[in-house]
Image (cartoon, rainbow, N blue to C red):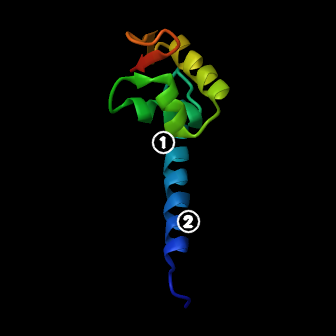
Amino acid sequence: MTPLTSTSLLDLLSERNDQVRRMSEQSWNEQSDIQLSNSEWYILATLYQSKTTIAEVTHSVHISRQATHKLIKNLESKALVLVTDHPQNRKDKCIEL
């Protein structure tokens, strides 16, 4: 038996995390009328902690800015998130569950 290296342990944990996320996504989509993609789940998980900006979400989920905006528009159309103007920055938008 080969020893478990830190890299292989991280890979194993990452793989298991992805499996659990896929299982929860599939379970949700089977039980709900609101269908969510894996990327939409990542954004919702980021928003769970607090209200934030779209730019901060983009940095934390490592998805392109354009894709993040599209996903957030989808979530907004499903009435899962609220997008508002940022009080100090006209260019940025705030987003919350």
Which element type, helix, strand or loop, lies under badge 1?
helix
Q: Label 1 amino acid?
A: Ser
Comparing marks 1 and 2, which lies closer to the viewer? 2
Residue 12 picture location, percent across and down: 53, 66
- Quarter holding the N terminus is bottom right
What amino acid does circle 2 point to?
Answer: Asp
* Residue 22, above or below 43: below
Instruction: Identify the residue at horizontal 57%, vertical 37% (top origin).
Output: 38
Residue sitting nearer the eye, 40 or 64: 64
Q: Which residue is at 65% across, 27% downward? A: 67
Quarter location, residue 52: top left
Q: Quadrant of the C terminus?
A: top left
Q: Residue furthest bottom?
A: 1
Relative height, residue 10 to residue 70 (above, below): below
**According to the image, label 1 marks what residue?**
24
Assess disc 2: are there few (<14), some (14-19) or many (≥20) residues with their C-alpha within 10 Å of its C-alpha. Answer: few
Q: Are marks 1 and 2 in contact (CB under 8 Å)?
A: no
Question: Counting other residues with Cα less than 10 Å from the Cα at mark 1, is it few (<14), some (14-19), or many (20 or more)?
Answer: some
Q: Where residue 79 sits in the image (x, y, percent)?
A: 47, 12
- Label 1 and label 2: CA atoms lie apart by 20 Å
Nearer the observer, 87 or 10? 87
- Give coordinates of residue 10: x percent, y percent: 50, 66
Kindly identify the residue that appears in the image at 52 percent across and 58 percent down.
14
Residue 37 location, x and y as percent?
Answer: 59, 32
Q: Residue at x 49, y 38 (%)?
A: 60
Secondary structure beneath label 2 = helix
What residue did someone put label 2 on?
11
Relative to the observer, which residue lies in front, 48 or 59?
59
- Mark 1 or mark 2, earlier in chain: 2
49 vs 78, nearest the viewer: 49
